[in-house]
Amino acid sequence: MKKLSLFFLIIFQFGFSQEEEITQKPIFSFDHGFSVYLNKQINFGDNFLSEAHKSVIGFGIQKNIINLYGFAIGAAYEFSVYKVTDKSVVGNIESANYSNFSARVTYDYEISNQITLNPFVGIGGTRLKHHKSPASGNNFGTFSGTSYNAGLYFAFNFTEKMHLFAGINYSYVSYGIKNAPEYDAFFNNSNQIQIHLGVGFF
Amino acid sequence: MKNSVFIFLVFILSSCDIQYEGNTRLLVTGEVVGRNGSPLSGVDVIAKISQGSGFGSRKENIGITTTDEQGVFKMLFPKPKGEIDYTIHFLSAENYQEKRFVNIFYEDFNDYAYRMGETTLYKNDDIVNLDFSFNQINPQNNITELNVIGMLADYLVWVNPNDEQQNYVYYSQYQVAKNQTLVLEYIVHDFINNQNTSHSETIVIEEQNVTYTITY
């Protein structure tokens, strides 16, 4: 308990030190930044998501929580609707909802006062829930897996409190699907490039 | 009150849906050929599932595909939960017969796959009925087994017998292809002497329906 109290005292000390050292970034601070973005997912490779689904435009939201040594640590949630394009692979099903929740670490690399590069990595969980139709409550079960992400944003600081950004994200998802042996690789991974376009707030 | 009843009904109806294991995928594969063994392309194949019987039974066409140029088909679909009867239904294509393989259970799947092998579909105008009539001249005899070997064209194939059929010893009605010679094999059991006698006969099928009489 004493160690925990000491830890928080040190943490808050670093937090308040920001006021004294305006020209230097603190080692630790709480990060209130968040962003929302449109998310276009492009799947590729010989897997069920690429071969039998087509993504409609989705959205994402990212919330930073803390900043440590210039790395923003937070969480991201992404949601996208998919149409089923090959029923022989998926079943007599019309659509799927793709969602991903991940922890994300982003680094701020300032090119200039207005331009910032934000490389990031993340790890999280992905769910793919199949429906008879987008409006139907009838569901056909859920795929779930572990996602690994890496990407890069180009941010334009529009005002002091807001920036626009565009970026690209690679996502690999490993699933745990039980199926016939010849379809093991087909059902147990997916690869996708995501194109993000959004707005962020500091 | 009306709203409560409505919500209750919606809840009851929605709970009637067949539930699925999303993380388990089943595979059904096979090949469809015509009478001469040539592949039939463009045949629609549907995997139907049903759960329960009578009022409250649930049905779904869960798998759907079409045979390719080699007559080969494959379909994958999520595994339904609970006790399910599977039916694989071959829809007619260009005057060919329909065919249903019924009463398939999950236990018939091996390693999440049900591999059907080759299924032959005959043209509708290439099929006649073969009926057996039984002329029992010796009361101590019973027919205990009957098999018809040749080009059978039944519309319905029972992969597993249903409760009633488990008491059947043989079928007395068949659909068969025209212009062939079938082999009929049957066993007559003399229950007084406890002896079995095997019989093998040929049946010539031409253009007309046939009623074949077995005398025992």
Image (cartoon, rainbow, N blue to C red):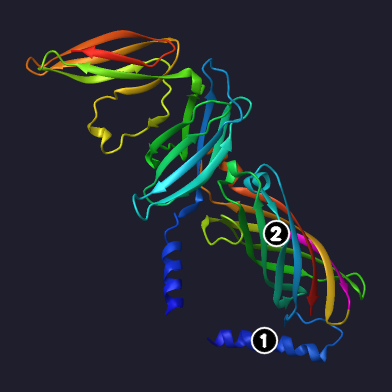
Q: Chain of mark 2?
A: A
The residue most toward the front is B208
The image position of residue A132, as x and y in percent, is 56, 54
At 55% across and 46% down in the image, what residue appears? A91
Decide whether the magenta segment is chiefly helix, strand or loop: strand
At 75% across and 78% down in the image, what residue appears? A33
**Is residue B122 visible in the rendered structure shown here?**
no
Judging from the image, what secondary structure is the residue with disc 1 in?
helix
Near-viewer residue (A91 or A186): A91
Badge 2 amino acid: Asn
Determine which residue is flagged by label 1: A10
Q: Quadrant of the N terminus of chain B?
A: bottom left
Determine which residue is flagged by label 2: A149
The image position of residue B11, as x and y in percent, is 44, 67
On the image, which quarter does residue A88 sit in? Answer: top right
The image position of residue B203, as x and y in percent, is 34, 9
Near-viewer residue (B196 or A190): B196
Instruction: Describe residue B145's horizontal placement relative to residue A92 as left or right.
Output: left
Badge 1 amino acid: Ile
Mark 1 is surrounded, within 10 Å at the Cα level, by few (under 14), some (14 to 19) or many (20 or more) other residues, namely few
